[in-house]
Amino acid sequence: MLSSKASCLCGGVKITALEINPKFTVCHCDTCRAWGGAPFFAVQCGTKVNIEGSEKVKMYKSSTWASRGFCSDCGTHLFFKMNKSGEYNMPAGLFPSLKEIKMDMQYFSDQRPDYYCFSNETKEMTRAEIMEYFAKYV
Ligand SMILES: [Zn+2]
Ligand SMILES: [Zn+2]
């Protein structure tokens, strides 16, 4: 497990994640790509996450099982949070000093458009496989 600090572009929100899984997931789903304009490089941060400036964080409930948080001043995307477990997934790019991470999994591999493809060797899950696996979180 790693720990690292993050900040939004305006500095109004500062985040310290204390238990970061060094193996991260890329999500190609339509919602993530609409949200960020590109696939979501999601680092699993568990629940040990301290947020300074949380009054600036606006939450959007993007599905029945999770919400997405962003800075209401500068718009920086901060996290994808599971409603039930309270676990955070945060964008890899938010952590400037987090270098020792590895792309391990690609979600919604069947929703990836043909205009990009990563050469990293990873595991993959299709939408159907994910829906079955995550049924317990809904
Ligand atoms: Zn901000
Ligand atoms: Zn997604």
Image (spheres, rainbow, N blue to C red):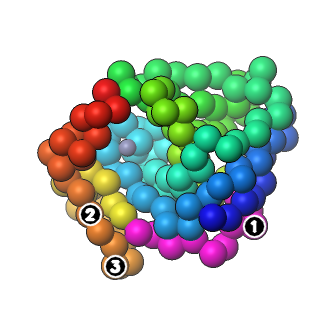
The residue that appears at 61% across and 41% down in the rendered structure is 47
* Residue of label 3: 121
Checking the image for residue 124, the label placed there is: 2
Frontmost residue, 81 versus 6: 81
Instruction: Please name the amino acid that badge 2 sits on.
Output: Glu
- Horizontal and vertical percent for residue 114? 23, 61
Q: In this image, 136 relative to 54: left or right?
A: left
Q: For marks 3 and 1, give the CA distance.
A: 23 Å
| Residue 82 visible in image | yes
Mark 2 is surrounded, within 10 Å at the Cα level, by few (under 14), some (14 to 19) or many (20 or more) other residues, namely some
The residue that appears at 43% across and 59% down in the rendered structure is 25
- Horizontal and vertical percent for residue 87? 54, 39
Q: For marks 1 and 2, give the CA distance.
A: 27 Å
Q: How many marks?
A: 3
- Specify the quadrant that holds the N terminus: bottom right
- Span of residues in magenta: 95-104
Q: Is residue 90 magenta?
A: no
Determine the residue located farthest toward the left in the rendered image.
Answer: 128
| Residue 113 visible in image | no
Q: In this image, 134 relative to 77: left or right?
A: left
Q: In this image, 71 relative to 42: left or right?
A: right
* Residue of label 1: 97
User: Pointers 3 and 1 in contact (CB under 8 A)?
Assistant: no
- Horizontal and vertical percent for residue 41? 49, 56
User: Pointers 1 and 2 in contact (CB under 8 A)?
Assistant: no
